[in-house]
């Protein structure tokens, strides 16, 4: 048992039920005085909060605000030595890491210095409790920020761990409008040093808009390369550079892996070293060992490893799983971990074997245990994935691929976001907004997401506003296995889960967060092609809990958009 000899061990196994309304336990002390966070006591945080705190319902309020300014510009960068058009953040790709402590307020001003695109910024996985208006989803929680405009997003870092931020306006994040985000907090295993975030992504030489158009008309394009922390060598090995991390022999490191892909799913490993996985998305888990980790788009794993091998340099590998993505440089998407004193910084190590797969990690057991009431599963509803089907394009004679999650492809209105409907008290949601109302407070909501059993493409399903419970997933038709195939006892919780190709995924969450929350496939092409629904959770409670005054800035968007040389061609998400 981890930490069994340590001072906070008495906290382990705490089982405050999720059904307690958050305001009742928000400030209840759950840690012991004198337990402070350090290399040998990472489970501690403050006198009142520790790894045993359920961060979904309870968090420190530090009163401190960390501020960032992100300026998006239209420029040329060369992540792997090949110059390409990118929308950089503060001139760099990926954007700067946003860092905060658990319980801080994060305040980020996003300035749109592009000429020809609106933008928004979404803070992936942040629960946005009471701040749905800060979720940064174009056409759902706000009108986009027009060129020359800016918007300040302010929200509480109530969870801790690793995530990323990205624009949420059609395929735009694929042009580089992404960056890591780290919220420091306690952990389920000890380490000496935090190496920070190591984000990786597929890389396309055409712009994301061009690649999205290829995907819509012909199917997903093959990625040209992959980058780790924004860099890699090109396929020919003639240009570009590997990201290099220097290690000190004997030290124990925390590394924060973030999959910022558009389409490619990877398995990652560090030659010769085993990872101890301590956190999945924002949910601390019981540590387990892994040589290779599967990461769906949007997923994060925090891992700990020890630099206890020979003083040398080692390859870190991100291998595209060919069952769920194609990359022209597969096998050579790498970075370097080099021990201090190594004779060469170019590794000669050989990777260990792994099995190709496109399915989630199976060993995720949340550290803070919560159960789901099985008797309420009878209320489960099914969402049938539809597609890919073809529809006519508006500007050409081409036909376009479309996906759907509740019968028809979603298409949001950048000029009238869902929160505007709520503010206006207008319940006549256009049908292509794919609004699913969840009016009841603190009720369990169960969803069976069923893929067509004849079409084997896996999809990373992401829900905003909640860490959902993953009750199960499998191949074939869920109706043929039924609820006996599900786990209601401390199932994994996270914000992205893989829907297996030709299979099913069952999730649950509690309606404890009023807002309009998107649920979508995180493959950039698929959400652009309509693969999403929005849960309108407790619409009646939104005006009294969420500040809707910012929607007034829609005027700036409405002034600019008619003059834009480009128009929305897809779902807008
Ligand atoms: C970026 O610059 C290019 C070249 O000037 C222009 O064609 C394109 O529309 C610009 N894109 C955005 C989003 O401003
Ligand atoms: C964004 O700008 C790019 C050019 O950089 C253009 O291709 C695309 O159509 C624009 N999209 C929107 C919705 O403005
Ligand atoms: C990623 O790149 C940034 C910017 O170059 C650097 O500061 C950071 O240390 C790198 N992270 C890792 C884990 O290599
Ligand atoms: C990132 O996610 C994408 C899509 O789910 C996946 O194809 C890719 O393999 C993942 N990358 C890694 C390194 O796990
Ligand atoms: C570096 O190379 C020298 C000369 O070949 C060798 O003696 C030494 O052991 C090497 N050091 C390491 C850390 O491999
Ligand atoms: C890995 O696979 C290769 C090729 O199939 C095989 O030759 C090798 O023995 C395997 N290595 C291990 C450690 O299983
Ligand atoms: C139609 O719109 C798409 C996406 O904006 C663009 O790539 C394509 O070139 C357009 N086709 C024509 C004929 O304008
Ligand atoms: C699954 O089975 C049910 C009941 O037999 C059927 O109505 C449904 O169409 C099937 N779904 C798929 C995706 O095959
Ligand atoms: Cu998908």
Image (cartoon, rainbow, N blue to C red):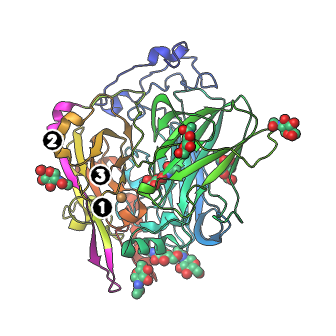
Asked whether residue 376 is drawn in magenta, I would say yes
Measured from the top left, where is residue 511 in percent x and y?
27, 42
CA neighbours of label 1 inside 10 A, class few (<14), some (14 to 19), many (20+): many
Q: Which residue is mark 1?
A: 418
**423 displayed left or right of 280:** left
Residue pictured at 68% horizontal, 52% vertical: 243
Q: Is residue 292 above or below residue 400?
A: above
Q: Which residue is mark 3?
A: 543
N-terminal label among 2 and 3: 2
Q: Quadrant of residue 257?
A: top right
Q: Is mark 3 within 8 Å of ligand 2?
A: no
Residue pictured at 42% horizontal, 56% vertical: 324
Q: Pick the residue in front: 17 or 473.
A: 473
Q: Is residue 8 above or below residue 547?
A: above
Q: Quadrant of ligand 7?
A: bottom left
Q: Which residue is mark 2?
A: 379
Residue pictured at 46% horizontal, 42% vertical: 281
- Which-is-in-front pick, marks 1 and 3? 1
Q: Is residue 474 above or below residue 119?
A: above
Alpha carbon of mark 1 to alpha carbon of mark 3: how far?
13 Å
Q: Secondary structure at mark 3?
A: helix
For the record, the magenta segment spans 373-400
């Amino acid at each position: 048992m981890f930490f069994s000899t340590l001072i906070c061990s008495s906290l382990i196994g705490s089982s405050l039920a999720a059904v307690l309304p958050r305001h009742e336990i928000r400030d209840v002390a759950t840690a012991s005085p004198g337990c402070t966070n350090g290399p040998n006591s990472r489970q501690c945080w403050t006198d009142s909060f520790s790894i045993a705190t359920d961060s979904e319902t309870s968090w420190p309020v530090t009163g401190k605000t960390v501020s960032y300014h992100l300026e998006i510009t239209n420029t040329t960068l060369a992540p792997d030595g090949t110059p390409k058009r990118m929308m950089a953040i503060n001139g760099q790709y990926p954007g700067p890491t946003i860092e905060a402590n658990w319980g801080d307020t994060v305040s980020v001003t996003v300035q749109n210095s592009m000429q020809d695109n609106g933008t928004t910024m979404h803070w992936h996985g942040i629960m946005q409790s009471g701040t749905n208006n800060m979720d940064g989803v174009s056409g759902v929680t706000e009108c986009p920020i027009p060129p020359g405009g800016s918007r300040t997003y302010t929200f509480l870092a109530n969870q801790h761990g690793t995530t990323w931020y990205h624009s949420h306006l059609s395929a735009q994040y694929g042009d580089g409008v992404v960056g890591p985000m780290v919220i420091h907090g306690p952990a389920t295993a000890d380490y000496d040093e935090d190496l920070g975030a190591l984000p990786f992504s597929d890389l396309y030489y055409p712009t994301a808009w061009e690649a999205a158009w290829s995907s819509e008309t012909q199917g997903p394009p093959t990625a040209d390369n992959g980058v780790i922390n924004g860099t890699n060598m090109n396929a020919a090995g003639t240009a570009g550079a590997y990201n290099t991390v220097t290690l000190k022999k004997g030290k124990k490191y925390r590394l924060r892996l973030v999959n910022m892909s558009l389409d490619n799913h990877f398995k990652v490993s560090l030659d010769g070293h085993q990872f101890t996985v301590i956190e999945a998305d924002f949910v601390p888990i019981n540590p387990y060992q892994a040589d290779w980790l599967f990461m769906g788009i949007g997923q994060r794993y925090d891992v700990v490893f020890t630099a206890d091998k020979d003083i040398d340099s080692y390859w870190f590998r991100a291998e595209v799983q060919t069952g769920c993505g194609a990359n022209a440089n597969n096998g050579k998407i790498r970075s370097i971990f080099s021990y201090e004193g190594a004779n060469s910084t170019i590794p000669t190590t050989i990777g260990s074997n792994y099995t190709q797969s496109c399915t989630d990690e199976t060993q995720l057991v949340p550290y803070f245990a919560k159960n789901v009431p099985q008797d309420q599963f009878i209320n489960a509803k099914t969402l049938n994935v539809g597609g890919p089907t073809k529809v006519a394009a508006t500007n050409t004679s081409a036909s376009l691929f479309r996906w759907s999650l509740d019968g028809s492809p979603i298409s949001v209105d950048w000029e009238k976001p869902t929160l505007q409907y709520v503010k206006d008290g207008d319940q006549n949601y256009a049908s292509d907004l794919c609004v699913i109302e969840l009016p009841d407070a603190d009720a369990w909501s169960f969803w069976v997401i069923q893929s067509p059993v004849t079409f084997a493409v896996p999809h990373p399903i992401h829900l905003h506003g909640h860490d959902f419970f993953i009750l199960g997933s499998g191949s074939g038709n869920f109706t043929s296995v039924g609820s006996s195939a599900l786990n209601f006892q401390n199932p994994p919780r996270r914000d992205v889960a893989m829907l297996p190709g030709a299979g099913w995924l069952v999730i649950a969450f509690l309606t404890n967060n009023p807002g309009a929350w998107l649920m979508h496939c995180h493959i950039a092409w698929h959400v652009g092609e309509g693969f999403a629904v929005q849960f309108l959770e407790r619409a009646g409670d939104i005006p009294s809990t969420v500040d809707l005054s910012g929607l007034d800035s829609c005027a700036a968007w409405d002034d600019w958009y008619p003059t834009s040389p480009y128009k929305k061609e897809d779902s807008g998400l």
